Image: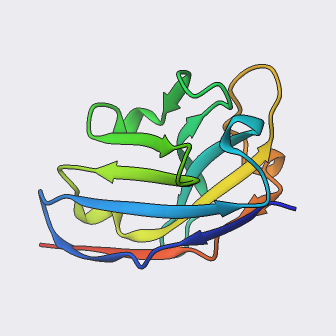
Amino acid sequence: QVQLVESWGGLVQVGGSLILTCAVSGNSLSSIDVAWFRQAPEKERGYVAVMAWIGVVTTYADSVKGRFTISRDNGKLTLFLQMNSLMTEETAVYYCAARQRSVGVHSTRGTYGYWGQGAGVIVSS
């Protein structure tokens, strides 16, 4: 059973940066695909970034390409999301997620069975 525990989110000004962390237990990071999703108020939860189990394969939502980076520390069983040049519309609850590894890169929310509790990020103007 994979468990995910996120760090606190935060308040950041437009154009600022923030890093989110997610502690993983119950399995090694090389055995699972991991991802970050976010849900803004009154909107559906959508994917932000995915890292396949192999670690070197990643994909990003078009809106965050070049600004966000997903990474992991295998030894510390920790997943990261580095967010730069944040915009007000990126105010949301951010979730880390995991699924058993499989072929390909998966960004569909419904295929992820393990979720963190969510971290609130507020981007102020």
Picture quadrant of residue 3: bottom right
Instruction: State the image coordinates of residue 82 (x, y, percent, origin top left).
Output: 32, 50
> Which quadrant of the rendered structure holds the C terminus?
bottom left
> Which quadrant of the rendered structure holds the N terminus?
bottom right
Going by the image, does 117 lie left or right of 93? right
Residue at the image position 29 percent from the left and 52 percent from the top: 83
In depth, the one of 72 and 114 nearer the eye is: 72
Compared with residue 103, is residue 80 higher up or lower down, i.e. above or below? below
Colour scheme: rainbow
In depth, the one of 22 and 36 nearer the eye is: 22
Going by the image, does 98 lie left or right of 101? left
Compared with residue 20, is residue 102 higher up or lower down, i.e. above or below? above
Instruction: State the image coordinates of residue 92 (x, y, percent, origin top left).
Output: 43, 70
Going by the image, does 59 lie left or right of 125? right
Residue at the image position 53 percent from the left and 63 percent from the top: 22
Residue at the image position 38 percent from the left and 75 percent from the top: 9
Observer able to see residue 92: yes
Compared with residue 11, is residue 15 higher up or lower down, i.e. above or below? above
Observer able to see residue 44: no
Instruction: State the image coordinates of residue 29 (x, y, percent, origin top left).
Output: 67, 43
Residue at the image position 19 percent from the left and 72 percent from the top: 12
Specify the farthest residue to the right.
1
Specify the farthest residue to the front.
75
The total number of labels drawn is 0
Picture quadrant of residue 100: top right
